[in-house]
Image: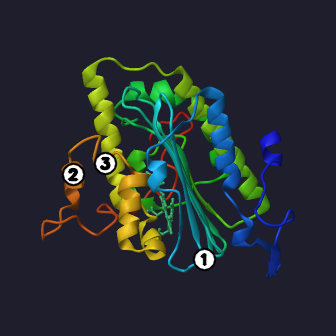
Amino acid sequence: HPELMTINFSGNSHWSKRKTRGHCLLRVSAISYQDFIDFSLNETKRYTPLLPSPLQEKYSSMIALDGQTRLEMLSFETPRIRVLRSMSIMGEAMQVLDFAAFPKPEFDLPIFCGNFFTAANTNIVVLDLNPLHDVISRRDYKEKYYDHLMPLGLKYTELLPWGGKLTSESIKFFSPIVIWTKFSSSKSKHEILYSAFVEYYKAWLELMEQAVDETDPSRIMSNLEAQHRYLTWRAEKDPGHGLLKRLIGEKLAKDLLRNFLFSGIDELGSKTFLDYFPEYWSDDGTISEKRSIIGKGFENRPWDKNGEIVGND
Ligand code: BLA
């Protein structure tokens, strides 16, 4: 696998290791997601011109309140991608990548989602082609985008096994090929993650290239609303919020979430979070602070090898 050989880690050219109870652990700052970003931008350019995004002017880099951790933002658009953006967080205690591609509403393409959180010795990973439409009730959508990708999904979900219980509400935003995993840092796991990212992103670019733009206004509206609902969910309930607030303060974190990471909330639709997710109404009429109403669930991977949902926990 050529991709397996190309991963680089920041700083020294060799691995920083320390011994703890016989295990070789990697220092957090020895891990970098820069290669992931370099790969994805170069690969995108092979398909389509990368155009500047108006978001780039306002969001480029920041130093966190600790005076040490750096946040770096990149954003672009293309004729078929409304926003292609990344945020990386680089610190002594954590390395984070949040990479996403949001298609224009003329396309019912999945949303590319690469979310990697690395701290001390844990990694929390979601890598997916998030479905724009419900893969359970819309069989045509599942067949169109996921059936042919099941072998790819199976390969990586064996190497990067299911991460256990998660916020149950999240399952509807995931596809049958989602990689949801947690692991302790090791050279081999990070190499596997890199090659999974490479293969998933290539698969997404292929879908993008083959996509046919919708002309039926009601279908465009339905794509628009589905993407708006997705943005609304993530801008309100994404698990990284707490950390982001600690890093840069509540005000800047909210601005970054609404206007950079999940930009489009104010333009793509006018429904509110509570319109889409009324179960989050709290007694005083505001949005419940809880991340989940249903609670945690899905101890095991809820899809079979054909991508059919098995049991709903
Ligand atoms: C934890 N991040 C998680 C978890 C998931 C995700 C499923 C486990 C906890 C849970 O189930 O809520 C990721 N969930 C997602 C994604 C989607 C989703 C990507 O529904 C998309 C639809 N993680 C990041 C970023 C940060 C981050 C950018 O992607 C930090 C800025 C941090 N994620 C983070 C932390 C945890 C976490 C700190 C553990 C804390 C916790 O579980 O509350």
In the picture provided, is 195 more to the left or to the right than 293? right
In front: 242, or 294?
Answer: 242
In the picture provided, is 212 more to the left or to the right than 169? right
**What residue is disc 2 on?**
272
- For label 2, count other residues whose C-alpha is less than 10 Å away and answer few (under 14), some (14-19) or many (20+): some
- Give the amino acid type for the residue marked by disc 2 in the picture: Thr
First along the sequence among labels 3 and 1: 1
Q: In which quarter of the image is the N terminus?
A: top right
**What residue is disc 3 on?**
265
Q: Mark 2 vs ligand 1: CB under 8 Å?
A: no
What's the mark number on residue 241? Answer: none
Asked if residue 230 can be seen in this view, the reply is yes
Q: Distance between the residues labelled 3 and 1?
A: 31 Å
Tag nearer the camera, 2 or 3: 3
Badge 3 marks a residue whose secondary structure is: loop
First along the sequence among labels 2 and 3: 3
Residue 307 point in image, percent of width and height: 51, 36
Tag nearer the camera, 1 or 2: 1
- Give the amino acid type for the residue marked by disc 3 in the picture: Ile
- Relative to 205, does residue 245 appear above or below in the rendering? below
Q: How far apart are marks 2 and 3 (CA)?
A: 9 Å
In the picture provided, is 98 more to the left or to the right than 294? right
Badge 1 marks a residue whose secondary structure is: loop
In front: 48, or 118?
Answer: 48
- Give the amino acid type for the residue marked by disc 1 in the picture: Gln
Asked if residue 313 can be seen in this view, the reply is no
**What residue is disc 1 on?**
68
Image marks 3 and 1: residues in contact by CB distance under 8 Å? no
First along the sequence among labels 1 and 2: 1
Q: Mark 1 vs ligand 1: CB under 8 Å?
A: no
Residue 93 point in image, percent of width and height: 63, 75
| Residue at 47% in and 56% down | 59
